[in-house]
Image (cartoon, grey):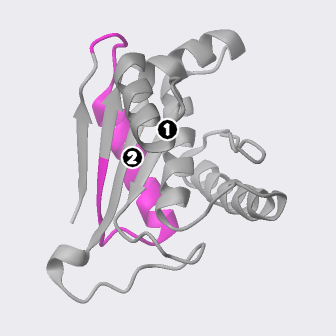
Amino acid sequence: MGVVLRNLQSVVPLRRARLRRDVEVLRHIFGVQRFDLGIICVDNRRIQHINNLYRKNNQPTDVLSFPFYEDLRPGKIPCALQRDEYNLGDIFLGVEYVKHRCKETSQDLHEALTVVTAHGICHLLGYRHETEEEWIEMQQKESYILSEFNRLTGSHLEPLTKRCT
């Protein structure tokens, strides 16, 4: 059980070892370390294509999540019965998009990628933010996860959750 981390972009230099380490800490905090997880880092062109294809939104974005378990209630850990069911799904990180946003906010790229990955894992575990109620629930979960991450690593990460999008 583990993390498959692929870097399919060459626009932004990326330290995969650091991202992998942070993802392992997040998996532990979420309680899903037994589950496989795919993290795919892509450029604006590719994430825009995926966003348009699956969400009919023809713009680049920071993160897209594709859960293995599509009907999970928020926060519920999947009940895997077979070995091949120990899979949370895949997260596409729009690294170029995140880098551009980091330039605007003077935020560290790798810290932002960790926050965006936490957001993506929330989606894999059934959290959404299409309504105000869902947004509040997801915001609370992200805040908790990142406060635990900060406690364990000495970081100072803040959630990125957007309202009702």
Indicate yes or no whether the magenta region holds residue 13.
yes
On screen, residue 146 above or below 41: below
- Give the extent of the magenta segment: 10-38
User: How far across and down, in percent of the image, does residue 115 sit?
Assistant: 57, 41
Numbered label tally? 2
On screen, residue 145 above or below 81: above
Picture residue at 30% right of the left edge, 72% below the top? 34
Q: Earlier in the sequence, mark 1 or mark 2?
A: 1
- For badge 1, the amino acid type reads Val
In front here: 154 or 85? 85
- For badge 2, the amino acid type reads Ile
In front here: 71 or 122? 71
Q: Residues within 10 Å of mark 1 (few under 14, many from 20)?
A: many
User: How far across and down, in percent of the image, does residue 65 sit?
Assistant: 44, 49
Q: Residues within 10 Å of mark 2 (few under 14, many from 20)?
A: many
The residue that label 2 is drawn on is 91
Relative to 107, 110 lies left or right: left
Picture residue at 56% right of the left edge, 13% below the top? 100
Residues at marks 1 and 2, CA–CA distance in whole angstroms: 7 Å
On screen, residue 49 above or below 40: above
Indicate yes or no whether the magenta region holds residue 117.
no
The residue that label 1 is drawn on is 63
